[in-house]
Amino acid sequence: MRILILYPNSFPIGGAATNRLLSLCLGLIEKGHCVKVIISRPTERRGFELNQSIKGSYLGVEFEYATDNIIWPENKLLKFKELFHCSLKTISMVFKAHRKIKFDLIVSAATYTFSENLPYYWLAKITKSKLVLTIDEYPWVIIHRGKYSSVYRWFYISFYYKLFDGFIVMTKTLVSYYRKLASQWAKFIHIPMTVEIERFVNVPMIKNRSNYIAYCGNDPSGTKDGVNMLIDAFEIIKDDFPSYQLLLVGKVHPLVQEKIKNKHLQNRVVTVGVIHRDHIPAVMVNARALCLSRPDNLQADGGFPTKLGEYLAAGRPVVITDVGEITEYLTDGVNAFISGPDDVSAYAEKLKSCLLDPDNADNIGIAGRRVAFERFNFSNYSEDLHLFLSNL
């Protein structure tokens, strides 16, 4: 099949949503499908560019930006102008691509608004293609309900999901939820969080592994993945492990930096900013532990952290909180260290247990890696995804 994917974030290098999309693309290519990704707006910040190319091929996935400049403008008026221009150009590129390859499917990935997906719906109708949506959390109008009026929330929930012929959904919880909102003929497939296992194979290890624990991800506010709580937990145990540092990899909000300064942890909590995806495996593989302290909220309940798959694939012990469907795959003390959510002291105890017994922690990390190979390898789901899309 010929599949066109419309995506609004950095590609091919990006965050969790990009890694998820890339793994799905690789699974489709593995089954012989032709895949092209059109990025529907500029995505890069000046000075922090993850990507440099307007178009190209990455691991066999063709991609092209619907813009002549991939730098996202800072001026609000210029942003609006750029979005309007890119919307028109995206539509033009879809028709151009269809004339060239006659694609069978349009996949809307990580897009949430009517303004973006209503044109995709009509494009699918005009080109006689099926329209598929990827989903990894509850509706934004519910998660961020304070930003939207009750009338718009009702309208969105009542009609938005009826635009799509099929849904690729990350958790079973979300499958049950969205079935009630979609058209009765729409089809669903549950594809769990997926990871490119090969990225973590044969990664060089430092002979005397550095004494750091790490969080790798983008949680600028410090609240989505519980980075603020992680810093508080590390503060509790830091005197027991004076040689250890907490490494924060990814975007960090100035308020998080201020928190580190106010707690006088500048020498113990190190922020390294965004690093290239090719360097992430080495950071993870050489960590003493990999940390994720998500709070218990609606976003965590419906979603599943993509970074957890990468943590497990690295073969290092993970210290996580029991939210969402995590314990359907992992067991505390067997293949992960699992704490109750929103409890700094309990999470600190799990961190301490992990660091006090390195041999046991290493064994738990190895067991976690087996879970990644068995349950989260994208290749394990490529056949199911192939059959699902072929039968839409």
Image: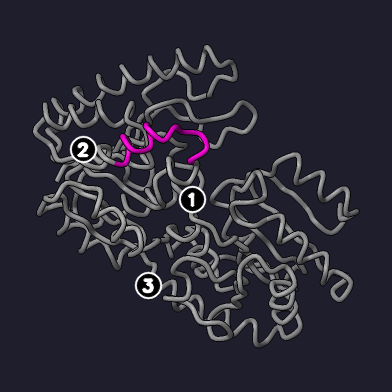
Hey, what amino acid is under mark 2? Leu
What residue do we see at 71% from left, 60% from top? 229
Quadrant position of residue 88: top left
Magenta segment main secondary structure: helix
For mark 1, does the 10 Å Cα neighbourhood hold few (<14), some (14 to 19), or many (20 or more) residues? Answer: some
Q: Of the residues tagged 1 and 2, which is closer to the observer?
A: 2
Dots 1, 3 in contact, CB < 8 A? no
The numbered mark, 1 or 3, whose residue comes first in the sequence reads 1
The label shown at residue 163 is 2
Which range of residues does the magenta coloring cover?
Answer: 145-157
Q: Nearer the viewer, residue 389 or 342?
A: 342
The image position of residue 105, as x and y in percent, is 17, 41
What residue do we see at 68% from left, 69% from top? 343
Hey, what amino acid is under mark 3? Arg
For mark 3, does the 10 Å Cα neighbourhood hold few (<14), some (14 to 19), or many (20 or more) residues? Answer: some
Could you say whether the residue bearing mark 2 is in a helix, strand or loop? helix
Identify whether 56 is placed above or below 343.
above
The numbered mark, 3 or 2, whose residue comes first in the sequence reads 2
Alpha-carbon span between mark 1 and mark 2: 25 Å
Dots 1, 2 in contact, CB < 8 A? no
Could you say whether the residue bearing mark 3 is in a helix, strand or loop? helix
Identify whether 199 is placed above or below 354.
above
Q: Is residue 184 magenta?
A: no
The label shown at residue 167 is none
Q: Of the residues tagged 3 and 2, which is closer to the observer?
A: 2
Could you say whether the residue bearing mark 1 is in a helix, strand or loop? helix
Q: Is residue 223 left or right of residue 155?
A: right
The image position of residue 367, as x and y in percent, is 51, 82
